[in-house]
Image (cartoon, helix red, strand yellow):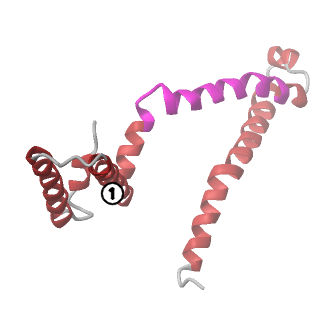
Amino acid sequence: MRKDVGFRCWYYLRTGWSTYFSVIFSAINTLTVTYYLAIENYSNLKEVFSSFELYVLLTAIIGIPILTFTGYAHYKKTKAYRSEADVWIESNPYPARELANSEIIVELNLKLTEVIIKLLKNEKLTDDQIKELSETQQKFSNHIKTRTIDNGKDKELFPR
């Protein structure tokens, strides 16, 4: 059993609440308040929305597509999500470390497969290829020795 089970439960509670229940509760609250405090008190609006159920239905028909498009735009069409991701990486550098490690692994695997293919064809590595492999090895060795979680050196490996 993990020692931090209380904090894990607290995290799961906050995630469940903020991701699922808060949307439902805030929608119910907004619909109820706007209908009973605004629409019921204005006869012109009361004629358009004769009942609470009709108001909910029309708001859902119009609101859900608008809010869905807004969410899509947030992730795909604006720089807002990218900025959020940058802030998240700055405040939590561990995902940057994982990404840097995967960049290192991919580059090394490509170089290794080049060497393996040459060796399978009974070809010798040229001095330039050996030098390139040594430089790659030295580059990553230096990187691994100098990087820390806080110094941001892992970000240097990311193509931008």
Q: Nearer the viewer, residue 113 or 55?
A: 113
Q: Residue at x 56, y 83 (%)?
A: 2
Q: Is residue 118 left or right of residue 45?
A: left
**Magenta segment, which residues?**
56-81
Which quadrant holds residue 38? top right
Say above or below: 34 vs 105. above
Within 10 Å of disc 1 (Cα), the crowding (few <14, some 14-19, many 20+) is: some
Question: Which residue is drawn at the image coordinates 17% and 48% (left, top)?
Answer: 125
Q: Is residue 25 left or right of residue 85?
A: right
Q: In the drawing, does residue 58 fall left or right of residue 72?
A: right
In the rendered image, residue 62 lying in the magenta stretch gets the answer yes
Q: Is residue 111 magenta?
A: no
Depth check: give the residue in front, 151 or 160.
160
Instruction: Assign the N terminus to one quadrant of the image.
Output: bottom right
Q: Main secondary structure of the magenta part?
A: helix
Q: How many marks?
A: 1
Give the residue drawn at x 60%, y 61%.
Answer: 14
Residue position for label 1 = 101
Q: Which image quarter holds the C terminus?
A: top left
With respect to residue 28, does 108 lie above or below?
Answer: below
Instruction: Point out residue 8 in the picture as x, y percentages from the top left corner.
Output: 57, 72
Type of the residue with mark 1:
Asn
